[in-house]
Image (cartoon, rainbow, N blue to C red):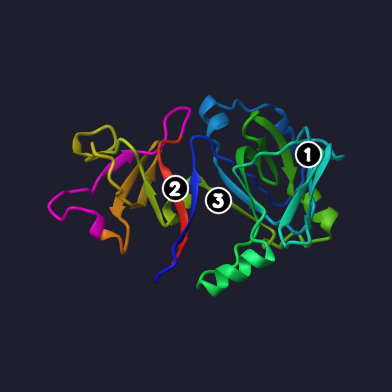
Amino acid sequence: MIKHCAIVFLLPIAILTSCSTGNTAQHIETMNAKTPVTKAQKLIGSGLLEMTTDRPIPLFRNAADSIPFDTLKFEIDKSGRTKFISRTAIAPYRLSEGDSYSEGNRNIASGLIRFSPGLKFRVINTSNNIFEIVLNEQKMETCFINLKHFFDMNKIDENDSTTYKYEPWVNYLKRAEYITKKNLIIYDRPEGHIIYEEKNDRFLPFVVTEVSGDWIRLKKAFGREFNFDDLINYDGWTQWKSSDSILIRITEHTFE
């Protein structure tokens, strides 16, 4: 029997956090200048940042602050799950405590893996080493992560990139295992002519080969061609986001 597990991210609202090196006055001034952030940026952002869950993360109200208003910390409880500890209610793009010891053992015995804790934020605005992130997606509360302060607090070399990973949406979409979409309409080009419309909401898993603004080019996901009709041309474009929402469902990884 094949055991199958998918890690899926739903994106009507996305989350991300990002980090990078160098803490110059110019960069702080850029963030403090309140560069106009469009409604789409506020709701969708520019990408996702994955942060480590074994080192504290200082959080700042303003880009120029040197003292955090809170520090997100992590603690492994007796069961083996990772607890997220902060004075502030957080609800990021992704927050997972990971498997307990017993859950991990069951997964391994079933041919899977022990799933690790995970933390991703949605990035709203960024200037080099400072990132405005959505800390709470439900309340649309934002704050700042400054990578230099994060490195300094944890005594990490500024060239160490193992504690964070920032991905623009373009990169994230193109590396996802597959995407699906309700009310799927495929066009020959962005804003072009319709070449296919799915009216029965069938499961049609695509990979993304190209991103152009609100549009993505589709290709049948490798190994899932049996989901498609050989007589239909699916090679085209569909809209992945609108001005204020994401229209697709993203499956980042599956484990079989």
Are the residues flagged by discs 3 and 1 in contact, CB closer than 8 Å? no
Q: Residue at x 44, y 48 (%)?
A: 250
Which region shows up in magenta? 226-245
Tell me which label, 3 or 1, sits earlier in the chain: 1
Q: CA distance from mark 3 to mark 2?
A: 15 Å
- Helix, strand or loop at label 3? It is strand
Query: Which residue in the structure is indicated by mark 1?
Result: 25
Q: Nearer the viewer, mark 3 or mark 1?
A: 3
Q: Residue at x 73, y 43 (%)?
A: 145
Residue 201 location (% of width, % of height):
28, 40
Badge 2 local density, few (<14 within 10 Å), some, or many (20+)?
many
Q: CA distance from mark 2 to mark 1?
A: 38 Å
Task: Using the rendered view, name the quadrant where residue 113 is placed.
Answer: bottom right
Query: Which residue in the structure is indicated by mark 2?
Result: 250
Query: Which residue in the structure is indicated by mark 3?
Result: 167
Amino acid at the residue labelled 1: Ala
Q: Nearer the viewer, residue 3 or 256?
A: 3
Badge 3 local density, few (<14 within 10 Å), some, or many (20+)?
some
Are the residues flagged by discs 2 and 1 in contact, CB closer than 8 Å? no
Q: Residue at x 81, y 49 (%)?
A: 149
Magenta span: predominant SS is loop
Amino acid at the residue labelled 2: Ile
Residue 224 location (% of width, % of height):
30, 60
Q: Is residue 20 magenta?
A: no
Amino acid at the residue labelled 3: Glu
Q: Is residue 36 left or right of residue 156?
A: left
Residue 249 location (% of width, % of height):
42, 44
Q: Nearer the viewer, mark 3 or mark 2?
A: 2
Tell me which label, 3 or 2, sits earlier in the chain: 3
Residue 107 location (% of width, % of height):
56, 68
